[in-house]
Amino acid sequence: QDVRSPSFPASMVTLRERGKDPRERDRPTEVVAVQICGATYDTEFNGVYSRKYSFVNGKLQYVQGASTWLLFFGTTVAGAKGWFLANTPVESPVREYEMFNPSPLAETPNLCCASWQTAGGNRDK
């Protein structure tokens, strides 16, 4: 679906971009930012996280504006893979973090399909 389509949510238009080359029309849209909404564990986690052109554990990381919150991919000490929300990106195994989404196949945070949870296993919502 084209991002400029009237049925596409307006808030998402600024979060995705399409390749400039017309031959790449069928290429999936590239994620330039993701938005977290409805976090209740800590409302500071809500906001837009923009792609940062640096890699952590083989995947791009995303930073929330002027704050210190980052989204990055990694592995827990127990071996679970997924996306982390923390103040500092770290190489795996990740020991200190605020939230974790155990979605090992998600190439980007917007593709996470599990619930976000704390290091203690408490799920947000």
Image (tube, rainbow, N blue to C red):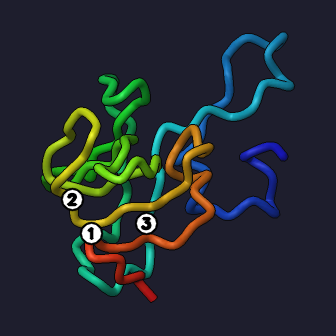
Q: Are marks 2 and 1 in contact (CB under 8 Å)?
A: yes
In the visual, does 29 lie left or right of 93?
Answer: right
First of labels 3, 2 by sequence position: 3
* Numbered label attached to residue 119: 1
Mark pair 1, 3: CA separation: 19 Å
First of labels 2, 1 by sequence position: 2
The relative height of residue 13 versus residue 41 in the rendered view (above or below) is above
The amino acid type of the residue labelled 3 equals: Ile
What residue is shown at x 27% (from left), y 41% (from top)?
Answer: 93
Mark pair 3, 2: CA separation: 16 Å
* Numbered label attached to residue 97: 2
First of labels 1, 3 by sequence position: 3
Instruction: Specify the quadrant of the image occupied by residue 73.
Output: top left
What SS does tag 2 mark?
loop
Residue placed under numbered mark 3 in the picture: 36
What residue is shown at x 57% (from left), y 57% (from top)?
Answer: 112
Mark pair 2, 1: CA separation: 7 Å
Q: Position of residue 87 (x, y in %)?
A: 14, 53
Instruction: Specify the quadrant of the image occupied by residue 124.
Output: bottom left
* Quarter of the C terminus within the rendering: bottom left
